[in-house]
Image (tube, rainbow, N blue to C red):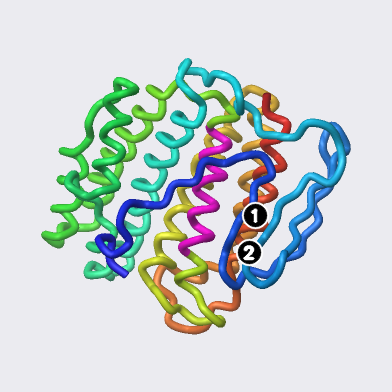
Amino acid sequence: MTESEKGTARRVTPRSWSTLTIAGAAVGVALAGSAQADTFTITTGGPETLWLTQTEGGEGGEGGEGGEGGSGAVPEVVVEFLTDLGLVEGHLRAGVELYRAGLADQAKTHMKHPQDEIYEDLKGHLDEFGAEDFAEELTALAEAVEAGKPVEEVEAALAEVLKEIDEAREHSGASEPEEAEAILALMRHAAEEYDEGIKDGAVSELHEYQDAWGFVQTARALAAHMAGEDDAAEKAFGEKAVAAIDETAPGFPSISPEGSVEADAGLILAAAAKVELAAYKLK
């Protein structure tokens, strides 16, 4: 499926204990333990609906919801901005990994151009938060890939884009709960793409599988950054999120698998549920 066929990237605005719908997902995982001794359970409501519910305890929810974010912007807008940045980054990470693997033709399909819909949507938020446009850096990376430049040059071009994306994140003024919600949103996007990409233990849509790979890698990088912070709560969340995301590794044997893939979207959803539970302690 091409980017034009898919249209604008689907956004997820995480809510507390929301319904996740993934065709064919079948997971039953009990996740217990929080400061309030709450218990959270993933159950299936038939073959097509996955529920994440709070079964005990008082008011649930991820930090930052219903209040103002660190930037003073509406929290949902901040999370949407961070998520869009993550989606762009995920595509580029997948593309460059493919390029490293000598799969330039596949890499080209993941390069984001300034005229792409996903960047056009992001551009409005860049203006809103006073962040710099990085269309020039995106173009340089895409052209390096399309021209078959040495891997080192492509990696250097990617580094420039990632620098701009990180600076844009700084402009969001996001709170820790908002950062965590964006990581969760990326994991949910990854699950959606993976569900399209892997069917019955085999690759059905390679591009979607690779999108999922990129989104998971981006979510992990963001969680690892939080794990390196001094704040105890942020550090604890980051470490738990990294550990949860690493549990998805069996579902990604390589960036472009040719054999069977014995996993389904439930693997990513289970990791996402653990990320959400860890975020519960962020205030």
**Image-quadrant location for residue 148:** bottom left
Task: Look at 43% across and 79% down and name the residue there.
Answer: 204
Q: Nearer the viewer, residue 203 or 226?
A: 203
Query: Is 66 positioned to the left or the right of 27 in the image?
Result: left
For residue 64: magenta?
no
Mark 2 element type: helix
Q: Split into 4 quadrants, where in the image is the C terminus?
A: top right
Identify the mark at residue 267; answer none if there is no mark.
Answer: 2
Task: Look at 53% across and 60% down and name the residue there.
Answer: 191
The magenta segment: 179-193
Query: Is residue 153 in sight in this rendering?
Result: no
Task: Give neighbour class at mark 2: few <14, some 14-19, many 20+ (Cα, 10 Å).
Answer: many
**Image-quadrant location for residue 268:** bottom right
Q: Split into 4 quadrants, where in the image is the N terminus?
A: bottom left
In the rendered image, which residue does mark 1 sit on? 271
Task: Look at 82% across and 37% down and name the residue there.
Answer: 34
Mark 1 element type: helix
